Amino acid sequence: MEGVDAIIRPQIPTAPKVSSRMALFTLGINHHTAPLSVREQVAFNADKLHHALIELTRANIAREVAILSTCNRTEIYCAADNPDMAVDWLAEYHAIERGVIQPYVYTLPQREAIRHAFRVASGLDSMVIGEPQILGQMKDAVRAAEEAGTLGTHLHKMFQRAFAVAKEVRSTTAIGANIVSMAAAGVHLAERIFERISDQRVLFIGAGEMIELCATYFAAKQPKELVIANRTMERGRALAERFGGSVMRLDEIGDRLGHFDIVVSCTASPLPIVGLGMVERAIKARRHRPMFMVDLAVPRDIEPEIGELDDVFLYTVDDLAQVVESGLESRQAAVVEAEGIITAQVDAFIGWLETRDTVPLIRSLRDAAERTRRHEMEHALKLLAKGDDPEKVLDQLSQRLTNKFLHAPTQALNSAEPEEREALRLAAQRFFHLHGE
């Protein structure tokens, strides 16, 4: 779960024509490009993420891949030849038509993909600029890719650099100042409906990180009752005890929902937990006293039709964006500083990638030189075994090695066309540390 308000909504470029050489790409949808109703269709459940990662590599769609799936984004970071195949895969995997998501999908080529990863890790692409939770979610995504064996050298290096950039941004700028978190926004909205939260009963559905954060904020208001409903009773009980609350099973929600004034839900369930009929019965039992509900899950835990009921105030992730406005000016100044840090780090990482491109050439060059050295060494040893003068054998060895090592560059210079010769001459001077007249 990322934060709530976008201070800067950057224009997301589309990819140019893809070259035959494998490169880094990022593709996906996020809160800038797609509404919640579309984002929830392509969200990845944590239980299925491992299988999805392996499927992407086995189908030869990507050689390296990691998937970041939060309430605000589903993004595929990959090293691939053709990222367009990943868009087809994304639609097919979630059993939806490509045309449904195509208008919302962005595909970022290498430099923009790297910059995007650095901005996401630093909290610059979140609804709440500077919110820290996305960094942990990105680390979870990297961990999942490592466990699936799909995180290769290029992506591993990119993410490690992204984490280092995020640390630098947070430690040297005021990017995290005056953040209004998702949890704080929920409390703020609840106080618009109820005069005092201390008079209300609060139900939390789920026991994950976001529910824990929300419970912390609501507990500070000392509600009349605080209850955690969770699939795993042990985990729910541990969280409830921290806040002096109680725990109940998920299958009890239908019978007890009318008892609660505030409901906050965030689970990984692929289907809604709170249905329209369930809430209609609860409102009737409450004699139409208002009920405040916050659905922080993607896909949604609470059926959207519930928001149309007269006595229900239902807010989703996207609805909360309007309440996060404090600290705008200080964050904007910090964003400018952060963008400068990111630009410099992108350039440095691109430099590293370019050196990686020369590794195969350097390896081939060394292999060829080693073959030549061994061949000439064997020839020299045979001459020594025959009793030839060692001094003459060594002199001959050095001459033969020199001639063979210089044969290819000399031939290239002599046979080059006029328009190529100057470039080769300059290259030879640089390779061999020569000083031309």
Image (cartoon, rainbow, N blue to C red):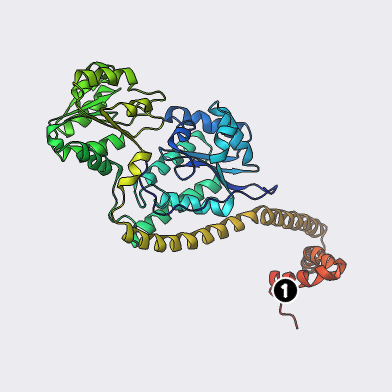
> Quick check: 67 left or right of 129?
right
Q: Name the residue at 50% across, 50% down.
A: 158
Label 1: which residue?
Answer: 429
Does the rendering let one see residue 174?
no
In the picture, the quarter occupied by the N terminus is top left
Question: Between 323 and 68, which is closer to the camera in this rendering?
Answer: 323
Helix, strand or loop at disc 1?
A: helix
Question: Between 75 and 383, which is closer to the camera in this rendering?
Answer: 75
Specify the farthest residue to the bottom. 437
Mark 1 closeness class: few <14, some 14–19, many ≥20 residues within 10 Å: few
> Quick check: 336 left or right of 216?
right
Q: Position of residue 383 (x, y in %)?
A: 82, 59
Q: Name the residue at 16% across, 36% down.
A: 197
Question: In terms of image quadrants, where is residue 431?
Answer: bottom right
> Quick check: 188 left or right of 116?
left
**Mark 1: amino acid:** Gln
Q: Position of residue 392 (x, y in %)?
A: 81, 68
Question: Between 313 and 35, which is closer to the camera in this rendering?
Answer: 313
Question: Between 53 and 75, which is closer to the camera in this rendering?
Answer: 75
Q: Is residue 71 above or below residue 97?
A: below
Question: In terms of image quadrants, where is residue 111?
Answer: bottom right
In the picture, the quarter occupied by the C terminus is bottom right
Q: How many marks?
A: 1
Q: Position of residue 416 (x, y in %)?
A: 85, 67
Q: Position of residue 436 (x, y in %)?
A: 74, 80
Q: Is residue 426 above or below residue 278?
A: below
Q: Name the residue at 69% across, 55% down.
A: 361
